[in-house]
Amino acid sequence: MSMQPTPNEKNLPRKVNPGLKLVLEMGPLALFFFTNAKYGIFPATGVLMAGVVVALAASWLLTKHLPVMPVVTAVAVLIFGALTFYFNDETFIKLKPTIVNCLFGTILLGALWMGKPLLPVVLESVLRLTDAGWRILTLRWGLFFFVLAALNEIVWRTQTTDFWVTFKVWGIMPLTMIFALAQMPLILKHEIKPPEDGSA
């Protein structure tokens, strides 16, 4: 029997070890945090800009695929990082999470309003859910992105730069993971499971 992959299988992105995927996602942020602690926000911004580019390049080399969210985030980091240096104003890099989260929230809720949930595309989902499941999950994630944007605004406008950096690196990711785990009951309820082998 031939073991050659089908055309559809060839087009699927290669899977990355979850630990390595976490390193690619958190590595630039961790470098941002430690560089800020030692040298300040401007060198840290430069390190973050370089880090997201390296992470995307590594992702491409490993999977021959670039996920939507990291690409959008990296482009935003480069744009707002460049503005930070050009105007010598750290406000721009602080605004980046607000803009990106509002962008994701607007795209998700706008597409949902038009009857075309885009969550599987935005989150690179491999889930198979019912239409009702996708609608509810899309609504929740869309609202959650706006919550993250609001939290970012509150923190950077009321706290020190060091506190904001700490929140951005060690606060946003845990909040996102907790929120994602909280969606498991909904996912399990609306998941479309493949038929068992030998079923009619």
Image: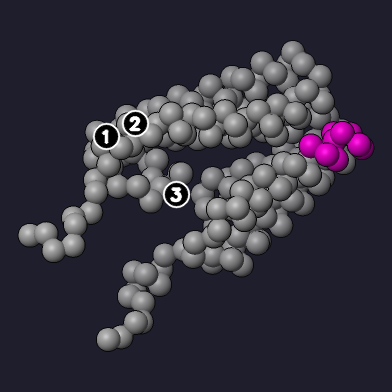
Q: Position of residue 150 (x, y in %)?
A: 59, 19
**In the structure shown, which secondary structural element does the residue marked by tag 2 occupy?**
helix
Q: Which residue is mark 3?
A: 124
Circle 3 Cα neighbour tier, 10 Å, few/some/many (<14 / 14–19 / ≥20)? few
**What element does badge 1 sit on?**
helix
Question: Would you name the residue on which mark 2 appears?
Answer: 185
Q: CA distance from mark 2 to mark 1?
A: 6 Å
- The residue positioned 53% from the left and 34% from the top of the image is 177
Q: Residues within 10 Å of mark 1 (few under 14, many from 20)?
A: few
Q: Does residue 87 appear to the left or right of 198 in the view shown?
A: right
Residue furthest to the bottom in view is: 1
Location of residue 158 in the rendering, given as x and y in whole percent from the top left corner: 74, 13
- The amino acid beneath tag 1 is Lys
- Left or right of 94 on screen, residue 147: left
Which of disc 1 and disc 3 is earlier in sequence? 3
- Magenta residues span 33-41
Residue 45 placement (x, y as % from top left): 80, 40
124 or 101, nearer to the observer: 124
Asked whether 79 falls inside the magenta stretch, the response is: no
Vertical position of residue 58 compared to residue 140: above or below = below
Image quarter of the C terminus: bottom left
What scheme was used to colour the molecule? one colour
- In the rendered image, which residue does mark 1 sit on? 189
Q: Is residue 39 one of those drawn in magenta?
A: yes
Q: Residue 171, how many percent across, how many down?
A: 65, 28
